[in-house]
Image: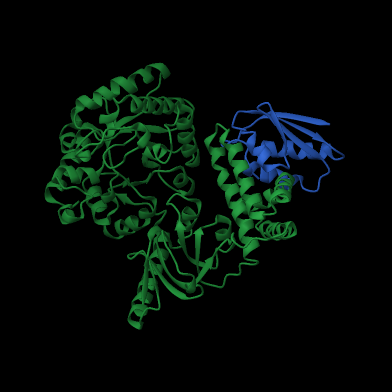
Chain colours: A green, B blue
């Protein structure tokens, strides 16, 4: 038995035949007629997807005369179709980079996908997938996935990220997907066992014992998935109160797939700052928040201001390195730094603008240690905007330090709190949550931690401050139950965890 | 030639989805449609061209429609505009 490990992009378990697909650019003496034929065939195929606008748009792009002329032109010069296609992509990239709208800028992925699809078509004549195929590609193509969705049991890639289009589709359709995988070409066509539940690995030629266990796991997982589907929209009532389930998200893409939800309980905004060369400007920030809000039908969104520093570093902000970053300058403590100050200023301003336009935001600040910090933030960032726009936006804090847990109720500027149990546990126990050596000490159910949680909830209820929980532990069914019994009415967690928690609560509350 | 001007209502602007929907409806109709926005223009047959106009919500766009069936094309666009080019 051979084992190959990767990183998880979509959970699941499946057995299937491995199909390795390469867009072979080394051997590419294709003629222009080959290209035209490939385009025609793809077009016919895409047009069959009458209800899928993504596929329809691909068909449209394939008959774009400008596209065809561009390729013809380049081909006459280079005699190389692949290079001509790459040139078209570069040309589009250049064109799109001049746009000042981020949503439109992102459409460059559509062009990339188109170009890759044509290349694939050329180098693989026809990709005929059998039933239960586990597909391997260096970089997965979204249209290939949509075309073959019924036949694909699993996906493996070399490159890929959690927020890529394909990964989101895979999670939506509950197809297991791993990335960071290298396969050997001689595995093509082999039966493989993909376990993206516990192992994040796939196996070749396992023994009978393994196969038996794998099958059991597969059956019980599929049964569970089916059951959970029923609980997705179930109402959970406790003592005549409906418990609200909100989602934690940290990307625009996630806001696209979420449906039937009571709102966003935690919008982590740091994602805007990562993977780029320089800081975003006001306009860009506003557009991102607007897009997310629109995707959610303007439901309530608790937006957490930038939580950077600690384990989340960003090069262009040039923040000083620290010996002990978890206890150093992170979260709100960084907002005095000039560059960060400007980012937060823009962030708050855009939220007031959007609220004025009917969007439903709440503002929450991370990593505060005492009420002085909370009040300083309020005076500096919130109050001036309240006066300028003549509206109020609910303002609250993350409770993640024991000091705030014991003192937030003395603050008159806050309307709500959300308890971040990851950091609260870490700081209460003085246990680094990223250190595997001491992971047994990192316990959400620790007596002291639970006592502190109890105090928080009581204080909040006494003072009429809204309290919700948004840490990972809120998604542990037993913890969710405890919190609800203590009086919590709102839980926020990863979208995909909600059905499981609801199911447990439905039977055990 | 027929002209048509309106303000874009789609939250995400006038991009690939509205364009796809529009092109589907105009297929087979003998008319040439050019969009003018933000001081630039593009034939709607050029996908990149239209995307590069960068049309956002609230932008004013002008359609110039010419050809044998320009009236028919115009009617279709007027009808679709009411629905925000969503279908």
- The quadrant of the rendering that contains the C terminus of chain A is bottom left
Q: Quadrant of residue A436?
A: bottom left
- Residue lying at the far bottom of the rendered structure: A208
- Residue lying at the far left of the rendered structure: A448
Q: Is residue A20 visible?
A: yes
> Along the line of sight, which residue is nearer the eye, A499 or A51?
A51
> Along the line of sight, which residue is nearer the eye, A409 or A87?
A87
Q: Position of residue A353 (x, y in %)?
A: 45, 25
From this view, report whether residue A390 is shown above or below residue A410. Answer: above
Q: Is residue B84 visible?
A: no
> Along the line of sight, which residue is nearer the eye, B62 or A265?
B62
From this view, report whether residue A190 is shown above or below residue A389. Answer: below
Left or right of residue A270, residue A452 in this image: left
From this view, report whether residue A450 is shown above or below residue A96. Answer: below
Q: Position of residue A460 (x, y in %)?
A: 22, 36
Left or right of residue A202, residue A146 in this image: right
- The quadrant of the rendering that contains the N terminus of chain A is bottom left
> Along the line of sight, which residue is nearer the eye, A422 or A474?
A422
Q: Quadrant of residue A355?
A: top left
Left or right of residue B47, residue A137 in this image: left
Q: How many marks?
A: 0
Left or right of residue A129, residue A17 in this image: left
Q: Position of residue A366 (x, y in %)?
A: 28, 35
- Residue lying at the far right of the rendered structure: B68
**Rendered residue at 42%/28% (across/down):** A351
Q: Position of residue A264 (x, y in %)?
A: 39, 42
């Amino acid at each position: 038995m051979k084992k190959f490990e990767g990183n998880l992009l979509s959970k699941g378990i499946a057995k299937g035949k491995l199909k390795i697909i390469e867009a072979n650019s080394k051997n590419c003496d294709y003629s222009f007629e080959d290209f035209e034929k490939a385009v025609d065939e793809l077009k016919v195929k895409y047009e069959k997807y009458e209800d899928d606008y993504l596929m329809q748009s691909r068909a449209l792009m394939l008959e774009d005369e400008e596209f065809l002329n561009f390729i013809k032109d380049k081909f006459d010069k280079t005699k190389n179709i692949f290079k001509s296609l790459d040139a078209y992509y570069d040309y589009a990239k250049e064109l799109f980079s001049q746009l000042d709208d981020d949503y439109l800028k992102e459409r460059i992925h559509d062009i990339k996908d188109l170009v890759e699809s044509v290349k694939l078509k050329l180098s693989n004549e026809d990709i005929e997938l059998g039933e239960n195929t586990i597909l391997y590609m260096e970089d997965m193509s979204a249209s290939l996935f949509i075309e073959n969705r019924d036949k694909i049991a699993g996906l493996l890639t070399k490159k890929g990220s959690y927020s890529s289009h394909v990964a989101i589709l895979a999670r939506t359709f509950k197809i297991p997907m791993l990335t960071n995988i290298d396969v050997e070409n001689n595995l093509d066509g082999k039966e493989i066992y993909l376990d993206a539940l516990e192992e994040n690995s796939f196996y070749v030629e396992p023994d009978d014992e393994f196969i038996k266990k794998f099958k059991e796991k597969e059956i019980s997982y599929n049964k569970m998935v089916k059951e959970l589907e029923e609980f997705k929209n179930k109402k959970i009532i406790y003592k005549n109160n409906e418990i609200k389930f909100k989602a934690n998200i940290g990307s625009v893409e996630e806001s696209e797939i979420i449906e039937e939800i009571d709102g966003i309980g935690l919008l982590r905004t740091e994602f805007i700052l990562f993977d780029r060369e320089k800081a975003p400007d006001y306009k860009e920030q506003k557009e991102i928040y607007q897009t997310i809000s629109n995707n959610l039908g303007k439901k309530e969104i608790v937006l957490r201001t930038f939580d950077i520093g600690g384990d989340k570093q960003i090069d262009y902000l040039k923040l000083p390195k620290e010996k002990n970053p978890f206890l150093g300058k992170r979260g709100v403590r960084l907002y005095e730094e000039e560059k960060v100050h400007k980012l937060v200023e823009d962030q708050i301003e855009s939220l007031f603008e959007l609220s004025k336009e009917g969007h439903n935001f709440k503002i929450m600040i991370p990593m505060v240690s005492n009420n002085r910090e909370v009040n300083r933030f309020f005076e500096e960032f919130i109050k001036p905007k309240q006066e300028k726009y003549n509206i109020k936006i609910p303002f609250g804090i993350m409770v993640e330090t024991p000091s705030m847990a014991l003192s937030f109720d003395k603050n008159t500027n806050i309307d709500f709190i959300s308890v971040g149990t990851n950091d609260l546990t870490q700081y209460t126990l003085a246990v680094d949550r990223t250190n595997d050596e001491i992971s047994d000490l990192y316990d959400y159910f620790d007596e002291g931690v639970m006592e502190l949680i109890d105090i928080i909830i009581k204080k909040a209820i006494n003072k009429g401050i809204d309290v919700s929980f948004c840490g990972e532990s809120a998604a542990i069914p037993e913890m969710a139950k405890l919190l609800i019994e203590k009086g919590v009415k709102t839980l926020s967690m990863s979208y995909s965890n909600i059905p499981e928690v609801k199911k447990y609560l439905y039977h055990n509350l | 030639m027929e002209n048509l001007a309106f303000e874009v209502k789609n939250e995400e602007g006038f991009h690939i989805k509205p364009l796809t929907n529009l092109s589907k409806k105009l297929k087979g109709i003998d008319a040439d449609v050019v969009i003018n926005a933000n001081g630039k223009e593009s034939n709607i047959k050029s996908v990149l061209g239209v995307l590069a106009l960068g049309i956002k919500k609230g932008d004013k766009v002008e359609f110039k429609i010419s050809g044998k069936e320009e009236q028919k094309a115009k009617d279709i666009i007027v009808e679709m505009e009411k629905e925000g080019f969503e279908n």
